[in-house]
Image: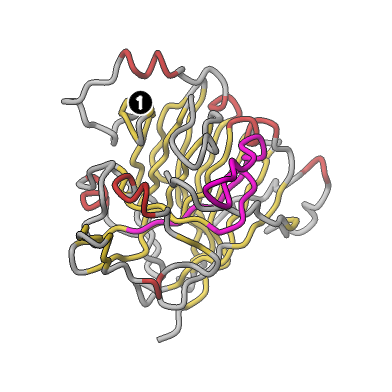
Amino acid sequence: MLGGVGLATPVARQVQSDEKGSGDSNNRSAGFPPSGITEYGRKVSLGNGEVRTFTSETPSGEPRYHGVEFDHTALEGLPSETEISEVNDPVETDKYRFSGQAATIHFKQSLQFFVPFPDAAGTPFTFLGLNWNPDGHFGGKGAWEKPHFDIHFHMRDPATVDNVEGPQLPPYDIKTADGIETNFDFAQLPEGYARSPPPVADERYITDMGEHVAPNDAPELPSGPDDRGDPTSFSNTLIQGFIGDTEGSQLAFVEPMLTREFLSDFRDSKTYDVPQPAEYPHDQQHPHEYSVRDIPSQNKTVVAIQSFKQVSD
């Protein structure tokens, strides 16, 4: 995704349960997602199990969560790079189907899904863009080559994201004899985040996603041209991203990027901050946290965005 910026390891906090009395370690997040206010989206097939989206909204219309549930078995029996490559047909583009679409994304084989979220009127989030990357993908100097999932919470409609082509220079960047001029909206860049550096500007815009930005201090990414970073440290990284046109860019997605090992071994419930921009691309409610929760009573792992707050005018 990114060529050379850093990315901070998220600072975790214990999740507060939505159900009274469910703080027992053997009943971890048993009441999640909260019953009575949660609507589920359609299921898709992944590995030996299934994945489905959900939205939780209070009776008064206040958004609580947009999330995705992974069966524990969905993290087993996942297709390899070779298996995805064998069914990768450039003409076949049905990423909306039950079994997903095999595709070449940022130079590697990926199994991708577009799955709608049930609507929540108070948020701009529309659908889940889920990618399984068995050999990881481009970024830094081998920073993200571990098998992992890209979990995009998209704010644009699926057709707009589906039309994004890459890898290429974003439409709001312009090459000149003196370098690159840009109409990128830096006011929407989340605090502490940076774009990938000019040497990889031609690879900033990624098919079916957009431009990815990341915090400045991740150990897995190089801190400068003479640094390699520490790719072994990658496990749980929050990316955010942009889509735009020649007139400018808009913050378009929030993306927890989690290794298969992290999700498979995760037996806890933790929240992590979502850094905020100075200005937003919408006038609705924006998430300030994301969470990862093990639901042992249901043999599931859940990733959700939460703590929605109304953006300022």
- Marker count (numbered): 1
Q: Kindly identify the residue that appears in the image at 45 percent across and 45 percent down.
A: 53
Residue 216 sits in quarter: bottom right
The amino acid marked with disc number 1 is Ser
Is residue 19 visible from the viewing direction of this image? no
Q: Secondary structure at mark 1?
A: loop
Q: Position of residue 248 (x, y in %)?
A: 25, 68
> Which of 183 and 164 lies nearest the eye of the viewer?
183
Q: Residue furthest bottom?
A: 313
Q: Specify the quadrant that holds the N terminus.
A: top left
Above or below for 304 versus 189: above
Q: Kindly identify the residue that appears in the image at 36 percent across and 36 percent down.
A: 106
Q: Kindly identify the residue that appears in the image at 73 percent across and 38 percent down.
A: 267
Q: Specify the quadrant that holds the C terminus.
A: bottom left
Figure coloring: secondary structure
Q: Position of residue 308 (x, y in %)?
A: 52, 69
Above or below for 188 versus 50: below
Specify the segment rendered in magenta.
215-242
Residue 147 sits in quarter: top right
> Which of 82 and 152 lies nearest the eye of the viewer?
82
Q: Position of residue 3 (x, y in %)?
A: 44, 45
Q: Position of residue 18 (x, y in %)?
A: 68, 59
Q: Give the left or right position of residue 80, taking residue 89 as reference.
A: right
Q: Main secondary structure of the magenta part?
A: loop
Q: Give the left or right position of residue 19, taking residue 92 as reference.
A: right
Q: Give the left or right position of residue 220, taking residue 17 as reference.
A: left
Can residue 216 be found in the magenta stretch? Answer: yes
Residue indicated by mark 1? 99
Q: Residues within 10 Å of mark 1 (few under 14, many from 20)?
A: some
Q: Kindly identify the residue that appears in the image at 42 percent across and 39 percent down.
A: 130
> Which of 231 and 128 lies nearest the eye of the viewer?
231
Can residue 302 be found in the magenta stretch? Answer: no
